[in-house]
Amino acid sequence: MQTVLIAGASGVVGRRALDQLLASANVDRVIAVGRRALPMQHPKLLSQTADLNDQSDLVAKIPEQVDVAICCLGTTIKAAGSQEAFRRVDHDAVLTFAEAALAKGAQRFLLVSSIGANASSGTFYLRIKGETEADLAKLGFANLTILRPSFIDPQGERGDNRWGERLVLPAAQFVFSLVGKHGRYAPIKAETVGRALVTLAFDETSERVRILEGKKLFAAGE
């Protein structure tokens, strides 16, 4: 039985992952950390408010040893307000959360990143995602699993105003229904990503760092 630590459990992917964790026979305890307490209760769930950019606060709010950590943190430059604010969430907070998880004994860390993430990218968004992946790989987890979805279908539940995604998603879904639903850039449901996170959290991989995208990601979430 595993104790799982999760950040970003209020997001469209994080909520799906949390539901899967609470239903899993592999999980004894789920500790969710975030800026706000989750609006739900469950015998397995402990929801803690914490400053995700303050490692000492995070460590203090995690009351026990953990086995697995799952990170679904993420924003957009528009929502964050600036490139600097975006980096504080998608890089700094992710690394702080990972360091706190490692300090609490986590051997596995799973991250929802993005297709095209590359520390050398000329695109700021993808460069920060790539830098985050590279910095996580240096921390020494026994297993680091990185999921790189393309467009995530929020299945009608995203609360922010991502008009670009709302316009592009239907067209992308139509195109990939013709050329291949599981392609590298094909839209993927939030539910599929959430299931993949939980499946991969408890499998028997021997890889220290693995990256899943396209068909491999879809298969993990089926």
Image (cartoon, rainbow, N blue to C red):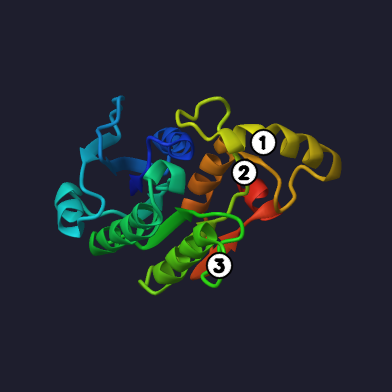
Q: Quadrant of residue 141?
A: bottom left
Among the two numbered marks 2 and 1 on one chain, the one whose residue lies closer to the N terminus: 2
Residue 200 screen position, x and y as percent: 52, 52
Among the two numbered marks 2 and 3 on one chain, the one whose residue lies closer to the N terminus: 3
Q: Quadrant of residue 14?
A: top left
Residue designated by label 3: 118
Q: Kindly give the residue lying farthest to the right in the view shown.
A: 178
User: In this picture, is 171 found above or below 65?
Assistant: above
Residue designated by label 1: 169
**Hey, what amino acid is under mark 3?**
Asn
Residue drawn 23% across the image and 59% down it: 104
Secondary structure, mark 2, is: loop
Q: Is residue 157 left or right of residue 139?
A: right
Q: CA distance from mark 2 to mark 1?
A: 7 Å
Whether residue 76 is visible: no
Q: Is residue 100 left or right of residue 123?
A: left
**Hey, what amino acid is under mark 2?**
Phe
Q: Is residue 170 left or right of residue 97?
A: right
| Disc ID at residue 151 | 2
Q: Decide: marks 2, 1 in contact (CB < 8 A)? A: yes
Q: Decide: marks 1, 3 in contact (CB < 8 A)? A: no
Among the two numbered marks 1 and 3 on one chain, the one whose residue lies closer to the N terminus: 3
Residue 64 screen position, x and y as percent: 20, 50
**Hey, what amino acid is under mark 1?**
Leu
